[in-house]
Image (cartoon, rainbow, N blue to C red):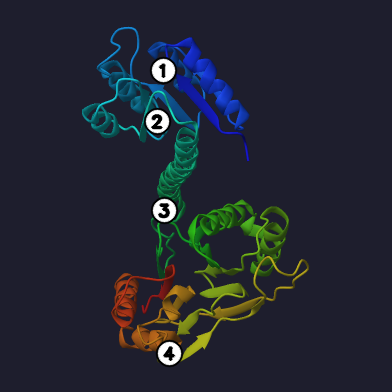
Amino acid sequence: MESPRVLIADDQAHVLEALQLLLKNEGFTPETASSPAAVIEAVQDRSFDVLLLDMNYSRDTTSGDEGLELLSRIREVDSVLPVVLMTAMGSVDLAVSAMQSGGRDFVQKPWDNGKLLGSLRRHIEEGRLLRRKKEELKRAERLILDVHDAREIQQRLLPGKLPQLSGFKLHGSSHPANEVGGDYFDGIRLTETSVALCIGDVAGKALPTALLMSNIQASVRGFPHETASPARICRQLNRAVLENMQSERLVTLFYAVLDSTERSLRYSNAGHLPPILLRNDGSTCRLSEGGTVLGVIPDAVYQEGQTTFTPGDRLVLVTDGITEAMNAQGEEFGEDRLIDVLRENHERSGLDLQQIVFDRVLSFTGQPLQDDATMMIISASRA
């Protein structure tokens, strides 16, 4: 451990010499200051583990007022520096005033070497602990600001509204469990009659997860979607996650292209919760064709699936923050409950249905979200 640095402040040369000799022999690194101005300058410019401060200087050698004034100025510069006060003209009132002003201990001259050293060692240890706690608090405050900024950035990255196509209504929303989340959804217009759709989930919580998902979103938008198939997009994303985003976090993703002219959806599912296609007659099918999660297997192969919409069909894409939401009894909301809610509210608009699902999940759990929850709904017009 680094030798403790002690600043000795006294206007008497023989006192400074005696204390320097004592502290050097005991393994301390002493530095001296002989005036209030020199003390303030030293505390401002350098870091010390403890300050041994004389209460009286040339202006007043008896009351200790000069030392109390200096102590107050020191506290303004460094609020956690331990200060051990010394005086040859001690009194109970002066000691009380010194301690109330921020002093840690009060030693009378002539001092007892053992007691003085014990006091310094004790307050050095306490001061270092207090300084570490203050630094941790500062780091926490900076992190809170960073997270707040990250949340604002992440919310701006998510689409305010999804692009619309003739014959379809598209809606999406995301509810992070914390300030920032690992869920993602997007809609990218390709042509007047086609839109790329994407929903993803990075395992984990907090800022690193959000940063990884933001990188994935940037990668998705950087690909040439017009000429790439969904399976090829997933292969490219898998390589990007492995090569450029050093992380052991699992990433699931569903990527699709919706064509309003053909009323078709081509898709590839990279380990994501299979979207639910609720037909107008109440039957369902799941869109699971694809491959494994992103970022695990370098040469992973992704297949492509395709489906078509008939009037009144509805495709619902969610992250597991909805299906795995858990109540106090440890029971998950589950896919069956989700499908029941979708069937019960099949006549409602996609926008209304989103809110109904989130409300049902919160009612079921009886507590705030424990994981990010995201939903996209693609509704085929009935006419």
For disc 1, the marked residue is 40
Secondary element at image label 2? strand
Badge 2 or badge 3: first in the primary sequence:
2
Cα–Cα gap, marks 2 and 3: 48 Å
Badge 3 or badge 4: first in the primary sequence:
3
Compared to residue 368, the image places residue 178 above or below, namely above
For the residues carrying marks 2 and 4, which lies nearer the camera in this image? 2
Q: Nearer the viewer, residue 281 or 126?
A: 126
Proximity of marks 3 and 4: CB atoms separated by less than 8 Å: no
Badge 2 or badge 1: first in the primary sequence:
1
Residue 142 as seen in the image, left or right of residue 297 = left
Q: Using a 10 Å C-alpha cutoff, classify the residue at mark 3 as few (fewer than 14 neighbours), some (14 to 19) or many (20 or more).
A: some
Looking at the picture, which amino acid does disc 1 mark? Ile
Which image quadrant is residue 97 in? top left
Q: Residue 368: image x %, image y %?
A: 33, 70
Q: Is residue 4 visible?
A: yes
Looking at the picture, which amino acid does disc 2 mark? Val
Secondary element at image label 4? helix
For disc 4, the marked residue is 336
For the residues carrying marks 4 and 1, which lies nearer the camera in this image? 1
Q: Nearer the viewer, residue 5 or 223?
A: 5
Q: Which mark is residue 155?
A: 3
